[in-house]
Amino acid sequence: MLEKQLHTYMLVHAQQMAEEWLQSRNNEEGSIYSIDASGEVESTLRKQHVKFTTMIADSMFDEYETSPWVKELASQRKNAGVPLIKILQNFNRCREISWRYIQRFADAHPETVQTSHIGLWSLKYNRAFDHVIEIFTHHFHKADDSAKEYHQNRISQMGVPVIPITENIGILPLVGEVDTFRATVIQEQALSKASGLKLQYLIIDLSGVYSLDTMVADELFTVIKELALLGITAIITGIRPEIAQTSIQLGLNFSNVLIFGSLKVALAHLLEPKKKVRI
């Protein structure tokens, strides 16, 4: 009887818990959890919080299937680009708020609620909460793996476009994000294509790349060294200011690589009959 009353109490106050949770948000710019998020996002979060509170309350006292809804929530959060650590932090805020309401219920019934009740509810509540988090994390990682697999398949299908300009000059234009997987694909395919085309120079144009970390830079340097072993001189063009600044901060050394500000300048230098490229 007492547990049923607590169950009803949590359902009745689910909307109020959601409002308290929404009011506890901070100003995380660009996050769906930001207090400055749009009204539509806030409305969605409110509904999801009420649903979550209801599910936890049901799970405490009855067998309740959580997997389908939690799986859908995990997929939505992944598609929204929310980091898992931020999601878990908000789960904990939900836990704290809803447990305060359980304590308020206990305080409102001092004659009937005993210490043993609090202990049992704590066990059931945390067990239900942890179960939901485990399911959510599992599906979030699965969604993340699927997204990575799709991304990698797309990269593999796109290939590496080594474009021959003359009999001995080719261009490898890179656009977008270059992660370690894509850098590996570039390394493998650039060597075979440049060698197959019998190039003397391969211009690697970075004007469309906006970020570069040490791991990707190491892969790039490896490509340059391996090309040199094949008798192919690698030239880098179009390094953006932000990449140049990041490179200095990370201690990346481009001193042994021939660099030009733009593809146009590099081609003019290579095609000038009276000049020779110096490494």
Image (spheres, rainbow, N blue to C red):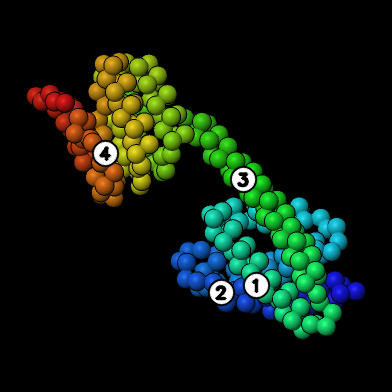
Label annotation for residue 24? 2
Q: Residue flagged by tag 4: what amino acid is it?
A: Leu
Label annotation for residue 252? 4
The residue located at (25%, 30%) in the rendering is 235
The residue that disc 3 covers is: 141
CA neighbours of label 2 inside 10 A, class few (<14), some (14 to 19), many (20+):
some
Q: CA distance from mark 4 to mark 2?
A: 42 Å
Tell me if residue 234 comes above or below residue 43 in the rendering.
Answer: above
Depth check: give the residue in front, 190 or 72. Answer: 72
Q: Is residue 47 visible?
A: no
Instruction: Give how far across and how far down residue 164 sits, in percent.
Output: 33, 25
Q: CA distance from mark 1 to mark 2?
A: 10 Å
The residue that disc 1 covers is: 97
Q: Nearer the viewer, mark 1 or mark 2?
A: 1
Earlier in the chain: of badge 1 and badge 2, it is 2
Q: CA distance from mark 1 to mark 3?
A: 26 Å
Q: Is residue 115 left or right of residue 238?
A: right
CA neighbours of label 4 inside 10 A, class few (<14), some (14 to 19), many (20+):
some
User: Residue 22's quadrant in the figure?
Assistant: bottom right
Q: Residue flagged by tag 2: what amino acid is it?
A: Ser
The residue located at (26%, 27%) in the rendering is 234
Earlier in the chain: of badge 2 and badge 3, it is 2
The total number of labels drawn is: 4
Q: Do the numbered discs 1 and 2 sit on residues whose CB atoms are within 8 Å?
A: yes
Q: Residue flagged by tag 1: what amino acid is it?
A: Ile
Q: Where is the N terminus found, in terms of image quarters?
A: bottom right
